[in-house]
């Protein structure tokens, strides 16, 4: 997955538990799993999601941010305000794809 290198990664951090799984609800990654994924894919910016939005979703965005830092990932953790529209403007990174350079998914 390290070749993916998305500019922005939106990742759930609310985890899963026995009660949800016994009800057939699969759940999501917890903070540690999401931080690992962030470091693994090499994203430049990451936005944690699905924490503290619904009763029982007990993910901790602060813990996630600390784990991202501890992982050595250079990703900036973005914590948008709750229930407000957000625009994320991130400079696109040029990266080598196949035999050409790609930007916005098109070979140049």
Image (cartoon, helix red, strand yellow):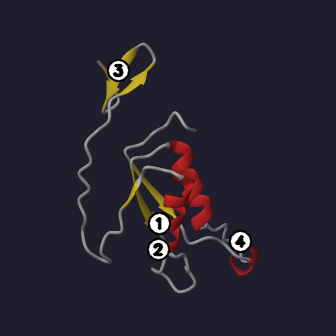
**Nearer the observer, 88 or 39:** 39
Quarter-of-image position of residue 23: bottom right
Tell me if 104 is positioned left or right of 34 in this view.
Answer: left
Choose the circle earlier in sequence order: 1 or 3.
1
**Nearer the observer, 26 or 65:** 65
Choose the circle earlier in sequence order: 2 or 4.
4
Q: Nearer the viewer, mark 4 or mark 3?
A: 3
Disc 4 + disc 3, Cβ < 8 Å: no
Tell me the quarter of the image containing the C terminus.
Answer: top left
Determine whether the residue tagged by mark 1 lies in a helix, strand or loop: helix
**Nearer the observer, 100 or 63:** 63
Q: Position of residue 68 (x, y in %)?
A: 51, 59
Quarter-of-image position of residue 18: bottom right
Choose the circle earlier in sequence order: 2 or 3.
2
Residue that numbered label 2 is attached to? 62
Disc 3: CA contacts within 10 A as few (<14), some (14-19) or many (>=20): few
Taking the spot 36% from the left edge, 68% from the top edge, the residue there is 79
Taking the spot 57% from the left edge, 45% from the top edge, the residue there is 40
Vertical comparison of 38 with 49: above or below: above
Choose the circle earlier in sequence order: 1 or 4.
4
Residue that numbered label 4 is attached to? 24
Residue that numbered label 1 is attached to? 65
Give the number of callouts.
4
Disc 1 + disc 4, Cβ < 8 Å: no
Q: Position of residue 106 (x, y in %)?
A: 32, 25
Measured in 3D between alpha carbons, the distance from the residue under mark 1 to the one under mark 2, in whole angstroms, is 5 Å
């Amino acid at each position: 997955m390290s070749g993916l290198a998305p500019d922005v990664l939106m990742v759930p951090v609310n985890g899963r538990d026995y009660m949800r799984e016994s009800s057939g609800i699969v759940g999501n990654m917890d903070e540690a799993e999401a931080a690992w994924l962030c470091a693994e894919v090499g994203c430049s910016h990451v936005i944690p999601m699905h924490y503290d939005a619904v009763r029982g979703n007990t993910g901790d965005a602060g813990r996630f941010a600390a784990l991202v830092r501890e992982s050595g990932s250079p990703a900036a953790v973005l914590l948008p305000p709750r229930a407000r529209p957000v625009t994320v403007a991130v400079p696109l990174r040029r990266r080598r794809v196949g035999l050409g350079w790609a930007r916005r998914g098109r070979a140049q």
